Image (tube, grey):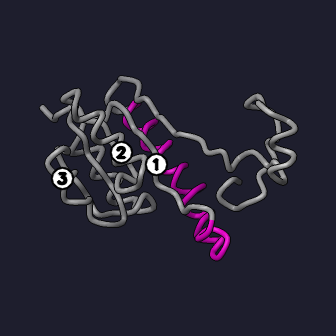
Amino acid sequence: MREQVVLITGANGEIGHGLIRHISSMNYPIVAIDVNPLDKPLRSMVAKWIVGDILDQILLGRLVVEHQIRTIYHLASILSTKAEYNPETAHEINAEGTLNLLRLGVEISQWQGYPVKFIYPSSIAVYGLPDSETTNKVGKIKENQWCRPNTMYGC
């Protein structure tokens, strides 16, 4: 029987580091994916780390066969500065990559007969507050307010 695991994409980023430490402290096996090798201090905390890309359909297909993925934490993305320089790549990774992972979750759910949790943290970049003066004047906002991103990453 295949081991039930938590999949973390973008595992080598700042949030990924903290998430790996937290989840591994609860003794859940983790499969970590990033386009760069996982930092050495984190390697002993995961069941498997993969240098790979969420656009790689063959890699994602292998994950379905090799693991019982119960939860997907999707952290992989092209962040603001790099996204502004290469918006097409940012769209490909941030939008198409997300769709690939959503499809993966659906495929696993249908094939194995259980729901897969899909956790996709948001970013303050989705809110298009134009400047710090406006931000200070508006104060706390609700999730559905100011949803006018002004960067490719925010979109």
Q: Given the current orientation, which residue lies at the most extreme top position? A: 114
Circles 3 and 1, Cβ within 8 Å, touching? The answer is no
Residue 99 lies in magenta, yes or no? yes
Quarter of the picture holding the N terminus = top left
Q: CA separation, marks 1 and 2?
A: 7 Å
Is 77 placed above or below 138 here?
below
User: Residue 43 — which label?
Assistant: 3
- Of helix, strand and loop, which one carries label 2? strand
Residue at x-position 29% and y-position 50%? 32
Circles 1 and 2, Cβ within 8 Å, touching? The answer is yes
From the viewer's perspective, is 151 left or right of 53? right
Please tell me which residue lies in front, 36 or 60: 36
Residue 133 lies in magenta, yes or no? no
Residue that numbered label 2 is attached to: 8
From the viewer's perspective, is 11 left or right of 135? left
Q: Given the current orientation, which residue lies at the most extreme bottom position? A: 85
Tell me residue 40's x, y (percent).
Answer: 19, 59
- Of helix, strand and loop, which one carries label 3? helix
Residue that numbered label 1 is attached to: 75
Please tell me which residue lies in front, 50 or 85: 85
Q: Amino acid at mark 2?
A: Ile
Tell me residue 88's x, y (percent).
Answer: 64, 71
Tell me residue 48's x, y (percent).
Answer: 19, 50
Q: Amino acid at mark 1?
A: Leu
Q: Amino acid at mark 3?
A: Arg
